[in-house]
Image (cartoon, rainbow, N blue to C red):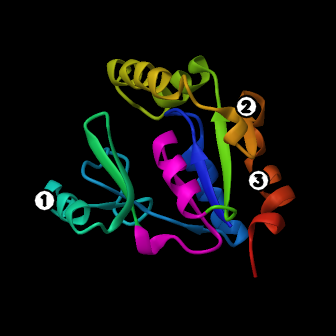
Amino acid sequence: MILLLVGPSGSGKKSFKAACKDFGIRIIKSCTTKPKEDEKDEEVYKFLTDEQFNSLIRNDELLEWVSYNGHKYGTLRNDFTKNCVTIVDKDAMHKILRTYSGKVFVIYFDISEDECRKRCLARGEDPSVVEEKIINDRNRLKSFDTRLANMIIRDKDLSRFKEILKENASKWVVR
């Protein structure tokens, strides 16, 4: 099964993704062009120059990619195998659903703007950047069709990631 995590900045997607490793779910590292201060290469991302990223696009090596808040993010085609998890935007989700029909489980993080703001600020992000992200996410996700989500995580679920994984991992991991 391929797990896709979709939701706004600060909604807990990276925390959930990191917790998946303990349950036999391989983490797909996204390619990106601009690391944030707290991000280290090869933990969550593969950091590339703009030239390297554009080369992947030209050579059709990315299954999906997006430009978001001045950064480019994408996922290598050959990284998609069974029992994996990645974070994508709603447009990438649609493409992956078409490409891997029947092999995808979508988890949508429907977290309040106030909670997302609080989480972003707690990790030391600049308040003006956080507000820009909130506005961008509001615009990008306003048309998200929640019927495409197999599971929806809300504010009250943020402290239950391990429990949610324990309850569901056996359904998601294909042996």
Specify the amino acid type for callout 3. Answer: Lys
Position of residue 25 measured from the top left corner of the image (x, y, whole percent): 65, 69
Disc 2 to disc 3, C-alpha distance: 15 Å
Quadrant of the image containing the N terminus:
bottom right
The structure residue drawn at horizontal position 46% and vertical position 28%, both measured from the top left corner, is 140
Q: Are marks 1 and 2 in contact (CB under 8 Å)?
A: no
Position of residue 153 measured from the top left corner of the image (x, y, whole percent): 72, 37
Say which residue label 3 marks: 162
Instruction: Tell me where the magenta segment starts and ends, as one range.
Output: 77-100
Disc 1 to disc 3, C-alpha distance: 39 Å
Point out which mark residue 154 bears: 2
Q: How would you rate the neighbour count of disc 2 (Cα within 10 Å): few for under 14, some for 14-19, many for 20 or more?
A: few
Mark nearer the N terminus (2 vs 3): 2
The answer to whether 120 is drawn above or below residue 77 in the figure is above
Position of residue 110 measured from the top left corner of the image (x, y, whole percent): 66, 30
Disc 2 is placed on an element classified as strand
Say which residue label 1 marks: 51
Disc 1 to disc 2, C-alpha distance: 38 Å
The structure residue drawn at horizontal position 56% and vertical position 74%, both measured from the top left corner, is 81
Query: Looking at the image, which is closer to me, 83 or 163?
Result: 83
Disc 1 is placed on an element classified as helix
Does the magenta run of residues contain 86? yes
Q: Are marks 2 and 3 in contact (CB under 8 Å)?
A: no
Disc 3 is placed on an element classified as helix
